[in-house]
Amino acid sequence: MTEIVRRHAENHDQRLLDSRGPTDWVHTDPWRVMRIQAEFIDGFDALADLGPAVAIFGSSRAAADHPMAVAAERLGGDLARAGLTVITGGGPGIMAAANKGALEAGGTSVGLGIEVPHEQGLNPYVNLGINFRYFFVRKVCFVKSSQGFIVFPGGLGTFDELFEALTLVQTKKVTRFPIVLFGSSYWQGLLDWAEHTVLAEGFISEADLSLVTVTDDVDEAVATLRAAL
């Protein structure tokens, strides 16, 4: 496995964003900017030659035998056999399942990890891995390196990635960027709220509701991504 790993006890995002604490950290901000710049360079360089890639998001808490993890493993394998690189957050659960499927199919299995207290490094199914200090650097690398997202059921981190992608597509910061929501029963409540509350209030347009494809079928998810490339 090719892996760029940084292991630090401190939480770099917290140190950057927290306005409380000793004022000596204020005077180190210029040096921190250089560290951020270096992290961008490392990420861009490591991911430069991936070719067509799909990012898969989903819960780190799903057991290996959870139906969504089983589907993610199959999806990772099918994407790899279709010549697409699979990128995940590199953690356990659905991410590990997708990486496992891609790796066992002989594909490139990428993990973009992040230092957070409750996770212990990259899963063993990653053959190209990077651990990031900063969430925002990691997010840029996800979008820059992927030609589409497949979003499985998950928690706050999954929602964060989903809504960021939707915002980038809506504002045309990225183009031809399919977003697939996998698991219709999980996502239906969110879609109903978007239509009957957010749209009804006039806060989004009808076109915004068409930015996602919802499916329970692995073949449809793969076909949706391939059609957009």
Image (tube, rainbow, N blue to C red):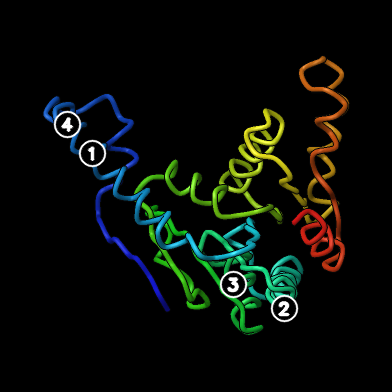
Give the image quarter of residue 156: top right
Q: Nearer the viewer, mark 3 or mark 2?
A: 2
Residue at image mark 4: 25
Residue at image mark 1: 32
Question: Does residue 54 appear to the left or right of 3 in the view shown?
Answer: right
Which is more N-terminal, label 1 or label 2? 1
Q: Nearer the viewer, mark 2 or mark 1?
A: 2
Which is more N-terminal, label 4 or label 1? 4
Residue kind at label 2, given as amino acid type:
Arg
* Whole-percent x, y for residue 107 in the image: 61, 78
Residue at image mark 2: 81
Is residue 117 visible in the rendered image? The answer is no
Residue at image mark 3: 99
Which is more N-terminal, label 4 or label 2? 4
Residue kind at label 4, given as amino acid type:
Trp
C-alpha gap between disc 2 and disc 4: 48 Å
Quadrant of the frame with the N terminus:
bottom left
* Whole-percent x, y for residue 66 in the image: 71, 70
- Residue at position x 64%, y 70% from top? 98
Q: Is residue 107 above or below residue 184?
A: below
